[in-house]
Image (spheres, rainbow, N blue to C red):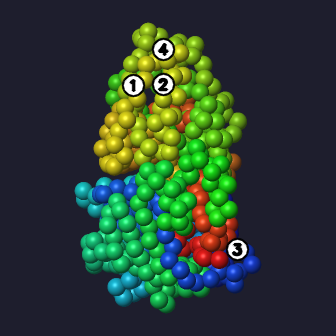
Amino acid sequence: MVSNLSRRNVLKSGAATVAAGAVWGLPTPGFSMAKSGGMLRVGVSGANTSDSWDGRTHSDLYMQLAGHGTVFECLTEINADGDLVGELAESWEGSDDAVVWTVNLKKGVTFHNGKSFGADDVIESLGIHVAEGAKSAAQPIVANIAKMEKTGEHQVQLTLKAGNADFPFLLSDYHILMYPAGMIEQAIADGIGTGPYRVESFDPGVRLVCSKVAGHHREGMGGWFDGVEVIAINDVSARMNALMTGQVDVVSHVDFKIETLLKANPNVEIFEVTGNQHYTFPMLTNVAPFDDVNVRKALKYAVRRQEMVDKILQGHGAIGNDSPIGPGNRYFAADLPQLEYDPDKAKHHLKLAGLDSLTIDLSTSEAAFVGATDAAQLYQASAAGAGVNINVVQEAADGYWSNVWLKKPWCACFWGGRATEDWMFSTAYELGVPWNDTHWNNARFQELLVQGRTTIDDAKRRAIYTEMQALISAEGGTVIPMFANYVGAASKALAHGKIGNAWAMDSARITKRWWFA
């Protein structure tokens, strides 16, 4: 066993005393510079009127931030340095084959309704993801658990069907919130978690108002605000205006078109981190014409990637290579041949598909990512020179994730990326999982997926994940033209330590980690 907290080996963690200072992303000198008080107002995109406290359904930043980032907690957490630390887990230890995991839970933790947190809550909270009829994005994570055993009031033993060296990382998934056993339906209805803020009012798709929990188990280490107001502002112009006029203190997803104006404001700070967020155009490969690999290859050669980075991201990112594994991942295959715009190759593959030209719809909305409509139009222009006629279909922002994504044959999308390769692949590319948005079926890829998660040897894992990236880049059903930095903006009245890059807005934990200076 190796005893460290990095993503490089998590078979055994140290006690929480090692990790406590890191959990909330605070600066290394300690907590002395952090101050309690004030009402934080956050303007966030990604809200829907169908939002709820059911973590299984959370799909965008608003509920990530409101859920595991404010009102609820997970068992583990990725801190600002990218290391794994405990949130409700005190420590964990895995067997040498990474099949059996023993998780020790923090003591003295209570839910907002007064119920004590313990092993029963963990087992029941995990179980809802594989319940009959449940539609959970975390289903592939929990489905690998063969047996959940309560080995003490504050200890659980989880035996997997197949070993997974990254399993503790998966327990930080924002869908896997901890609920009180025996009252999960009520907790979902009312927002009863163990987070540092309790729900005062929640109007889905509009606004969340929370107040600080007195005597919280993390008091003095995070959750500094007296209260938090999370306001849904999906429109990027309205969101920027809300910050500029002082209606909110911090906003997500800066509009790069007015970045210069924001920088000119002496009261505004732009904060930016590089992570694994990527903007995508997934196609359903079980639907014609995308079921033909040559059609997919034609579309891969029909996009000017650098143009999108320059014009959509304004340089705040890097070109993608149609693999979701980014520079923030350990086994990122940087040496893979880069897909380039090549209309002749695109036409060649169309001919191999038996086509002289191709006309297809591409559904898009600013709900997918800021600049998605413009990106689709750039794609339309470049593809025209390759014999591909793209009809850009502008969809409604509200309900985009429930009505368009996973349903329309080709659409715009974004992924926050995941901390480990297996986490990303098993969430979005494993056959049969709820969030597989291409249904790409490649037997070798699926074989390697299982091998990768059960392999402990580092060199062998690197070789496996390199081959998987090569396969998905060349033949997969997702065009990934760019990796986007996380860029937000805030009032300079706020203060913070190092900013995490697991998700936007300090890994969606800004309400727990920041404070008023």
Q: Circles 3 and 4: CB distance less than 8 Å? A: no
The CA distance from mark 2 to mark 1 is 7 Å
Residue 46: quarter of image: bottom left
Q: Quadrant where the N terminus lies?
A: bottom right
**Towards the viewer: 274 or 288:** 274
CA distance for labels 4 and 1: 13 Å
Kind of residue sitting beneath label 4: Gly
Nearer the camera: disc 4 or disc 2: 2
Distance from Cα at disc 4 to Cα at disc 2? 11 Å
Q: Which residue is mark 2?
A: 380
Query: Which is nearer the N-term, disc 4 or disc 2?
Result: 2
Instruction: Please give the count of numbered marks on the rendered protein.
Output: 4
Q: Are marks 4 and 2 in contact (CB under 8 Å)?
A: no
Answer with left or right where residue 417 lies relative to residue 53. Answer: right
Q: Quadrant of residue 202?
A: bottom left
Q: Amino acid at mark 3?
A: Pro
Q: Secondary structure at mark 3?
A: loop
Q: Can you tell which mark lies on residue 27?
A: 3
- Residue at (55%, 83%) from the top-left corner? 37
Decide which of tag 2 and tag 3 comes sooner along the chain: 3
In the picture, the disc for residue 391 is 1
Q: Secondary structure at mark 1?
A: strand
Pointers 2 and 1 in contact (C-beta within 8 Å): yes
- The residue indicated by pointer 4 is 387
Judged left or right of residue 231, residue 312 is right
As rendered, which of 501 and 494 lies closer to the eye? 494
User: What is the crowding at mark 1: few (fewer than 14 residues within 10 Å), some, or many (at least 20)?
Assistant: some
